[in-house]
Image (cartoon, rainbow, N blue to C red):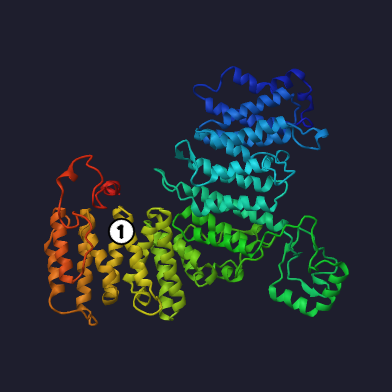
Amino acid sequence: RTATPSSHSSIFNDDDLRNDITNLVSTIESLRLYRNRGGELMRRAVCHFISCLCSSGLSLSVKQQVGLLDSLDGHLKHTSELIQKDATEALRQLLDVYFPCPKDSGGRPTERLINRTVKRYSDEVLRSDNPAVTRGFVSALGALPKKLLVDDDEDDEASCVKIVLNAVAHAAHFKTCVGMEKDAETRRNAVEAATSLVSTLPQLTEPYFYKILDIFTLAITKDYNTDRRGDVGSWSRIAAMKGLKELVLRVVRESDLPVFNSAPPTITSTGWGGTANQSLTDTNNVIYCPSLTERLEHLTKNSKEVAHRSLATKTPVHPYKKKTKPLVFWNDIVASSIIKIILQQLAEKLDTVRSTAGTVLSELLTATSPKIPFIPRASDLKDTLTLSSYPPPQQRQQQINWSHADQTFPLLGQALAIDEYFESILRGMVISVGGLTESVVRASTLALTSFVKGCVTLRRSAVLAKMGRVFLTLLRENHEKEEGGRVTLPLLKTIDKLIQRKLMDPLLVGDEGGDFGASLVEELRKEIRGTTDVTRLIAVANVLSGVLIVSYDKMKDGALPLVLLLLGHTYPRVRKHTAEQFYVALQDVSSSSCYSSRRDGSVDAVTAKLLEVEWGDSSLVAVRQERNEVARLLGVALKVSTRKERGEVSATTTKRGAGKMDDDFESYNSLVREAGR
């Protein structure tokens, strides 16, 4: 229990007792009570004791203050996450209560204190190879009080704020390694530290706003790192979305925008005004941003008066008063990008991520103090997500369980109709449709297919064409960035499901898709050549078979060579699955009334060949010879570039260490990796 001098003056008047209390931490350390059993509990107890000591307001000597700081530095480096959290909170209070700034320095901290805290913690974060050290000290950077975040010159690279932000941004980056490996806890703690800095920075200037915004957006959009524990990058994404909400609320409060009470103000001859005595600079009121129509109407009605006032003052006249420190960097571009990345997270597969994204989005859309301006089609988005009747925060009980797929995805399926957010929602929904969790896959698939089916029925060709462009963009981005199958595999599964439901027919056959079919086949060719992942190759085979069923005559020149390439693949599992899917596709094509190929028995011979050959068990040489015969029957010219593709085997290539193999698919690493998955 915390004691204060005012309530327990008799206790603190005892000099011996006061000395025992202030020297308790050094006594514990001299007795080495952190060792052996109970040492971790003792460390946590010491951190709590330091917090209570700071709350009590007892006077401490400089030596005692530094001793407590050294003790907390030791706890920050401990491997226990609970001890690090307790030490971070104690450090926040210790630096805030003690280590006063000298009056003769104008309230600035001493250079010694800055070196001892800001620069030391930043150096440890940037240079240490110990994950426990980086986790603890990056949290300590977020616990620094306002008096240490001094910034006399924004252009000075040695300013405390820039040193702290650079260290936090480095630790939060999704590619940063601690030692030789990435550390999820360090990245998460760095994002949480950036969130703390949002509230503690004395002034949120434009460079610092965009620096912190970059930390959050990179964590949300890029941190999909995984390890044996699963998607550990989600820890950073969740923390970043919470921090993003705090950043938006602060920057809107401090931005140079007109502020009013609750209802939209009336337009007067002197500008936008609510009541006669209402202050335009009262930041406690609700922000209301006039629409472009209102602004143009105001300027049109009062053009002479505005021009006269401009000429008289020789300065532009704004319909609202300027603040002493104008902050105008909150705009429609920033607002739109923030809502889009949150919507994408809301549409993805992890329940915890959706829960946080839904909560953050609803709070931003329904915020009243301040009201967030410049969100594109905010009212439509609120209506679609059933947030129009959302109660104020003090009366709010969670009405929508955003983590529940059956509640969230039907709303997102309707939100796809909002053109500004179509691509962001679709990008996230692709991950869910192609995921593994049955409830998420079922709900997201139903929502997406219902929307696409409505577009096909209503012949909304522009929306379908945009969907095709998003699919192709996702494939190209993953080829360029080499992100593996995180997006590609779910995307291929999504396309396959849409093809099976005949919802891709307008893009593959009709004029709406343009060259979508040819572009898709080209991207699939790159995928085959660029991966050894068995699951992705099987997904490619499924899509190619579906494309042939939908539009055989139009797509056979591009798709058949790829199918035959997979039919002679090194992996037996890929060959066997491709043969099965190709057989089904040819059966559907031959039974179609619009099939226009030659009816000379070649298709029947190919289907018979597909049934006769043991594609998964035969030797690779024999399989490729049979594959070449299938190509001859179909009239497809295969590009043969290696002896292995011609069915020849060199004796030297079978020896270990003989050099690089001729075939692109000789490595079985992926097959071993996928075994048992």
Q: What's the amino acid at mark 1?
A: Ile
User: Please, is residue 61 above or below residue 218 in the view?
Assistant: above
Residue on which disc 1 sits: 528
Tell me which residue sits at (26%, 72%) in the image. 556
- Is 296 in front, or is 588? 296
Asked which secondary structure carries label 1, the reply is helix
| One can see residue 496 in this view | no
Give residue 279's quadrant in the image: bottom right
| One can see residue 18 in this view | yes
Give residue 312's quadrant in the image: bottom right
- Is 186 in front, or is 669? 669
Tell me which residue sits at (75%, 43%) in the image. 152
List x then y, in percent, for residue 108: 77, 37
The number of numbered discs placed on residues in the rendered structure image is: 1
Mark 1 crowdedness (10 Å alpha carbons): few <14, some 14-19, many ≥20: some
User: Please, is residue 264 above or below residue 437 in the view?
Assistant: below
List x then y, in percent, for residue 322: 79, 61
Q: Is residue 604 left or right of residue 509?
A: left
List x then y, in percent, for residue 140: 61, 37
